[in-house]
Structures are given as C-alpha cells and as structure tokens.
Image (cartoon, rainbow, N blue to C red):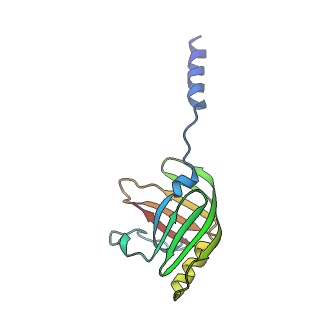
C-alpha cells in the first residue's frame, strides 16, 4: 500500500503544470543593441564591462505579442512579428522568430551599418533569451538566421 501511495504522490508532482513563460512576455520590453557577432568566431565577452547601454544607436521595443517599434540610428521603424518556443526554461528560452514586416517611418540618411542591421533584423528566424543572473547584468536576446551572424541585444 505504501508503494502505491508513494507512486501516486510522485506521479501527481510530475503532472502539475509548470507555468510557462510566453514568448510575447519574454520578449516584451526595451532591448538595446550590443553588436553583430559571427558564430564562427570566439569572443572573450559579448557584453563587456566597458559597454554603455545609453550609447547604443539601435533599440527595439517589443510592445506586445505581435508588434514592435525600433530606432535604427536615425531611422524610426515599426513592424509585426511572430514567435514560437523550441525550448523554454526559467533561465533560457529559444524559438523561432519571424519578422512579418519592417516599415520605416521616416527617410533620413542611412549608413551601411544601418542597412546591415536592418537586413539582419528583417531576416532573423530564431531567437534566444538568457535571463540575467549574478554573472550577467542584463537579460540577453540574440536574433539570428541561417547565416553565421547574429544580433545581440540587452535589457536591464
């Protein structure tokens, strides 16, 4: 009888639903661009101690589960996106990301860096969010596609 009760107790614990973090909630907020990195190169740090979050020229705000606004240097943009999870845990979430449209709202001078950022952001197919820990001062978001480069963002 004891084994049966113990089995039911253990089985019941595994049947409890854990609260999943929704992708629209994990991305929601203001993200500041750190840089574009290549997956083929080894970096000692992505967000180094000399990084100043206030000096970044690119920022993305995921407003809700479907839309965003962006500041790409002098360009102001908005758009829609969709996501789905591949992996969801308390410290790291990964999944697919689809930028449904990117609409530039103004037409100032666009630099080569602005164009590269815009292209990589538009073509992003995957996201990864690592929540801040004692070792990291920021939440980190990477947006990547099938090429070897990815965009890295942080959030306070």
Residue at the farthest top position = 1
Q: Is residue 79 visible?
A: yes
Determine the residue positioned at 38% across, 59% down: 136
Q: Nearer the viewer, residue 89 or 6?
A: 89
Q: Nearer the viewer, residue 104 or 47?
A: 104
Quadrant hosting residue 145: bottom right
Q: How many marks?
A: 0
Determine the residue positioned at 46% across, 61% down: 140
Q: Nearer the viewer, residue 66 or 120?
A: 66
Which image quarter is the N terminus in? top right
Q: Nearer the viewer, residue 136 or 154?
A: 154
Residue 29 at x, y = what percent? 48, 60
Residue 79 at x, y = what percent? 60, 69
Residue 46 at x, y = what percent? 43, 69
Residue at the farthest left position = 50
Determine the residue positioned at 53% across, 68% down: 69
In this rendering, position of residue 44 left or right of residue 20: left
Q: Is residue 148 visible?
A: no
Quadrant hosting residue 81: bottom right
Determine the residue positioned at 61% across, 63% down: 126
Residue 102 at x, y = what percent? 62, 73
Location of residue 20 with respect to 9 vertically, above or below: below
Which image quarter is the C terminus in? bottom left
């Amino acid at each position: 009888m004891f084994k049966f009760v113990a089995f039911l107790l253990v089985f019941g614990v595994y049947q409890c639903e854990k609260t999943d973090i929704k992708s629209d909630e994990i991305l929601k907020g203001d993200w500041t661009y750190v840089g574009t990195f290549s997956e083929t190169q080894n970096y000692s740090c992505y967000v180094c101690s000399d990084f100043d979050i206030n000096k970044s020229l690119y920022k993305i705000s995921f407003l809700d589960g479907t839309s965003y606004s962006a500041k790409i240097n002098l360009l102001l943009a908005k758009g829609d996106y969709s996501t789905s999870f591949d992996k969801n845990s308390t410290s790291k979430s990964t999944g697919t990301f689809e930028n449904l449209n990117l609409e530039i709202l103004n037409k100032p001078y666009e630099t080569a860096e602005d164009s590269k950022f815009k292209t990589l952001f538009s073509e992003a197919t995957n996201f990864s969010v690592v929540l801040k820990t004692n070792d990291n001062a920021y939440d980190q978001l990477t947006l990547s596609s099938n090429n070897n480069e990815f965009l890295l963002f942080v959030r306070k």
